[in-house]
Amino acid sequence: YCIPHSQDGVRQSGPVIQLGNPRPVLAPYPRIMLVPPLSTLVRLERTILHGFITVQGQFRELKPVRKEDEGFFSRIGSFLKTWEFRPATRDGLPVEVEMLLIIPGFQI
């Protein structure tokens, strides 16, 4: 997770380098996680999802990074919509963060 660079002031394109001592961001820990049945999760490859966690602690714009993960995401997406997080914070205030969710592959 990280603060999207558009929230930190000037929007830049390309790689961004921040010099100095950036203010720390405290992690957006999960509060509620509804896990689908194991038979839904069986997959040999890991799945990578990209999105945001809002200041309300909800996923926003969660979608698969790779095209081959779209079918799996369609099976578990409704479960992920129920997840709730303690929002990430910076300087004691809730902030939206950009994140990658990596679901490991496994078989039963």
Image (cartoon, helix red, strand yellow):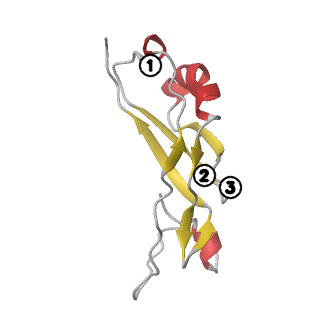
Number of residue marks: 3
Q: Could you tell whether 80 is left or right of 17 in the image?
A: right
Please tell me in which quadrant of the rendered image residue 13 appears: bottom right
Please tell me in which quadrant of the rendered image residue 103 appears: top left
Q: Which numbered disc flags the more N-terminal residue, 2 or 1?
A: 1
Query: Which residue is the site of mark 3?
Result: 56
For the residue pair 104 and 11, the one nearer the viewer reads as 104
Residue neighbourhood size for the residue with mark 1, other residues' Cα within 10 Å, grouped as few (<14), some (14–19), many (≥20): some
Q: Residue furthest bottom?
A: 20
Tell me how far mark 2 sits from mark 3, CA to CA.
11 Å
* Secondary element type, mark 2: strand
Query: Which residue is the site of mark 1?
Result: 41
Please tell me the numbered disc located at residue 52: 2
Tell me which amino acid carries mark 1. Answer: Leu
Q: Position of residue 92 (x, y in %)?
A: 56, 75
Tell me which amino acid carries mark 2. Answer: Phe
